[in-house]
Amino acid sequence: MLTSDEIRSRFLEYYRQRGHTEIPSASLLPEGDVTTLFTGSGMQPLIKYFLGEPHPAGTRIVDSQKCFRSEDIDEVGDNRHTTFFEMLGNWSLGDYFKAEQLPWVFEFLTKELGVDPSRLYVTVFAGEEKYGLPKDDESVEIWRRIFRGAGIEAKPVHIGDPDRGGEVGMQGGRIFAYSSKKNWWSRAGPPEKMPAREPGGPDSEIFYDFGTPHDPKYGPHCHPNCECGRFMEIGNSVFMEYTKTDDGRFEKLPQQNVDFGGGLERISAAVTGNSDMFQIDTLKRLIDALPGADMRSKRIIADHVRAASFLITDGVEPSNKDRGYMLRKLLRRSIVHSSMLERSENRALSASSGETLERCFGIVCDMYAGTYALDRERILSVFRAENQKFRNTFVNGMRRLDRLEAVDTDTAFTLYESFGLPYEVIKEFGGVKAASLTREAFEGKLEAHRQLSRAGAEKKFGGHGLILDTGELKAKDEAEVEKVIRMHTATHLLHAALRQVLGDEVHQSGSDITVERLRFDFSYPRKLTDEEIRRVEEIANDAVARDLKVECREMPKAEAEKSGALSFFKAKYGDTVKVYTIGDSFSKEFCGGPHVDHTGKIGRIKITKEEAVAAGVRRIRAVVE
């Protein structure tokens, strides 16, 4: 069976033989790109060359790019999600196009790697009539010829909207046409989200069919973009050939580009025919080095140790914000889950323990020694310092858990708040004494604590601190409290304005308010243009000028959701929630308050900065005047 090293080497050699120049992997910390904290795709370091700047290596390029996606961290633990991965990529900058790219990638997978062609399914762009973007019939015909050459008669199936895929099902198809929700690429997303002069184009994805039974909870029928786990995307060829004009039309770029990305770990899973990505050689070595039988904890440790090793080597230090916060989260989650495995093996916890994880860091350094120069000394030094800071508190919490005679919801919350013990640890190692503890009750306690903090914000605090659901607010007197409340309402106006300008994919990710300024985080894949910032500011201030009424209603959570009120956090809400409405329809959100009663009291909103927070998360800072 081919190893990951062999697959990477064969890919690079395959494209070198076809005139491509190999370039080294870029750092996980993007250089000259403030739109994101980490390098999350193979194309990210090359975007300026798609926009026309000549690449010093020429028009045909190949590489294996190390990538990190922080947004996937909460999904790690299943059989296919990782935060760190390698992206195999080949690139044509105005050179070859579809007729060369699609046969090449198919030949590489089936001939060089031995993937069974009958297990491969592909998707293409179905077209968007309202933008004058045609269906990618050329790719359909190329794929039909490719499959026919492999002895497979490939039937095209038009699905269009991927949300309807479960209704359409397979229908004996091999080539599936989806809308721009799935088969269009640009930095901003689908065509309607793209600003003027942004490049983009249709793409064609390749899926591997593991043949696992379809789970009907994802729809009555299966199809390549089904989430049931039967299919895994292993490669995507983007045909970047369009740009958006100032008047919203699409026209062809001066050059046609190819951007291919194939996850090394996913391709390795396809080569082995095992849908559990953690059974590929690089991850399995880590899994096998860990004690115990809890696969979820083992997968989390394997992923996090590997990701942390690369982040530390590229210069990240643990801290409480931005890149450092993500590294700290990786390390501390590894410590928690390593402790869970130790306890499952009846090993005594020690405040100085860390040998298991140190061994895993050593395995990572050894595995990648021939490809990446990981800094073993620095990795271990950073880990030991973080382990010393956190593990003592964690171990003390576990000892406190051991001494308890019973663990109810209140006790569990204290263990979480004081010692960082997550629900899973308390439940598993609490044993019989935690038998009555449920996740619903635990999360309900967390939400009740948040609600209590929010309720306090509706009183006059004098010299006390002020806490809202949007973050910690510092205020010394009533005048400062009043200003903070004005800025809190301003965040709702900015949220609504951002969604008007950028689209409904904008979701609040958090905020923080002080007397001096407000900070608002939201999901969005790229840096905002100066014009977009101006429009957001203009829409928000127009709402201020109209002096819209701000109203609050308490209602059952289910009723609030049906009313269209927005809520974007994973935290569990109580059965009764507060919904704040601004104007007739300008803004309607779940919120603990407090707010001004009319927007005219806010004052003029001025955006002072727009920046990246993490991959896919942006931040604006603003003041009210």
Image (tube, rainbow, N blue to C red):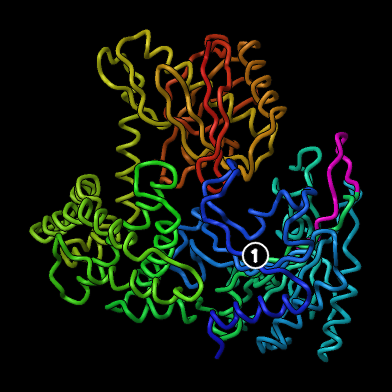
In the rendered view, tell whether residue 272 sits above or below residue 142: below
Q: Secondary structure at mark 1?
A: loop
* Res. 513 image quadrant: top left
Q: Position of residue 199 (x, y in %)?
A: 79, 48
In the rendered view, tell whether residue 293 sits above or below residue 27: below
Q: Is residue 494 magenta?
A: no
The answer to whether residue 225 is seen in the rendering is no
Residue depicted at 42% across the width and 59% down the height: 313
Q: How many marks?
A: 1
Looking at the image, which is closer to me, 3 or 350?
Answer: 3
Label 1 crowd bin: few (<14), some (14–19), many (20+), radius 10 Å? few
* Res. 529 image quadrant: top right
In the rendered view, tell whether residue 44 sits above or below residue 270: above
Residue depicted at 34% across the width and 69% down the height: 361
Q: Position of residue 416 (x, y in %)?
A: 24, 49
Residue depicted at 51% across the width and 36% down the height: 521
The region drawn magenta spans: 238-251
Q: Is residue 250 magenta?
A: yes
Three-letter code, disc 1: Ile
Q: Position of residue 469 (x, y in %)?
A: 40, 32
Looking at the image, which is closer to me, 109 or 295?
Answer: 109
Looking at the image, which is closer to me, 117 or 29?
Answer: 29
The answer to whether residue 441 is seen in the rendering is yes
Task: Answer left or right for 228 relative to 84.
Answer: right
Instruction: Give the dominant element type of the magenta stretch: helix, strand or loop.
Output: strand
The residue where tag 1 is placed is: 23
